[in-house]
Amino acid sequence: MPVEVKIRKGEPIEKAIRRLKKKIEREDIIRDYRAKRYFERPCEVRRRKKKVAAFTDMLRNRYANQ
């Protein structure tokens, strides 16, 4: 389903473009596109996800102890 932003009556184009950018960012369209631009082997996917999980756990533990 394509992302669509309707321009409201009397709304400047710049504001509509800003709303479109926020909508694209919220739906992670750009991030998905960049991630799928190149093939990533399954072991690399697992390694990357494991690294991200370890980092978030480290941060969670660091700020839970305060």
Image (spheres, helix red, strand yellow):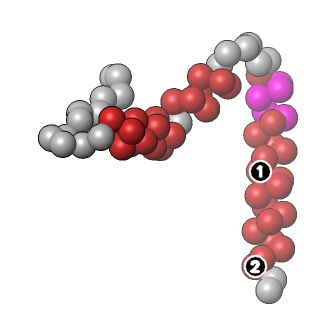
Q: What residue occupies the far left of the structure in this picture?
A: 9
| Quarter containing the N terminus | top left
Q: Residue at x 77, y 18 (%)?
A: 40
Q: Quadrant of residue 56?
A: bottom right
Secondary structure predominantly adopted by residues drawn in magenta: helix
The residue nearer to you, when weighing 62 against 13, is 13
Is residue 36 something that shows in the picture?
yes
- Element class at badge 2: helix
The residue nearer to you, when weighing 63 against 9, is 9
- Amino acid type of the residue that numbered disc 2 sits on in the rendered structure: Ala
Q: Quadrant of residue 35?
A: top right
Which class describes the residues within 10 Å of circle 2: few (<14), some (14-19), or many (20+)? few
Is residue 45 shown left or right of residue 5? right
Q: Is residue 45 magenta?
A: yes
Which class describes the residues within 10 Å of circle 1: few (<14), some (14-19), or many (20+)? few
**For residue 34, above or below residue 26:** above
Q: What residue occupies the far bottom of the structure in this picture?
A: 66
Q: Are marks 2 and 1 in contact (CB under 8 Å)?
A: no
- Amino acid type of the residue that numbered disc 1 sits on in the rendered structure: Ala
Q: Which residue is mark 2?
A: 64
Q: Residue at x 80, y 66 (%)?
A: 59
**Mark 2 / mark 1, whichever is N-terminal:** 1
- Element class at badge 1: helix
Q: Residue at x 81, y 36 (%)?
A: 48
Q: Which residue is mark 1?
A: 53
Picture coordinates of residue 32, whole percent (x, y): 59, 28
Magenta stretch: give its range.
Answer: 43-47
Is residue 20 something that shows in the picture?
no
**For residue 34, above or below residue 48:** above
As measured in the structure, the alpha-carbon distance from the residue carrying label 2 to the one carrying label 1 is: 16 Å
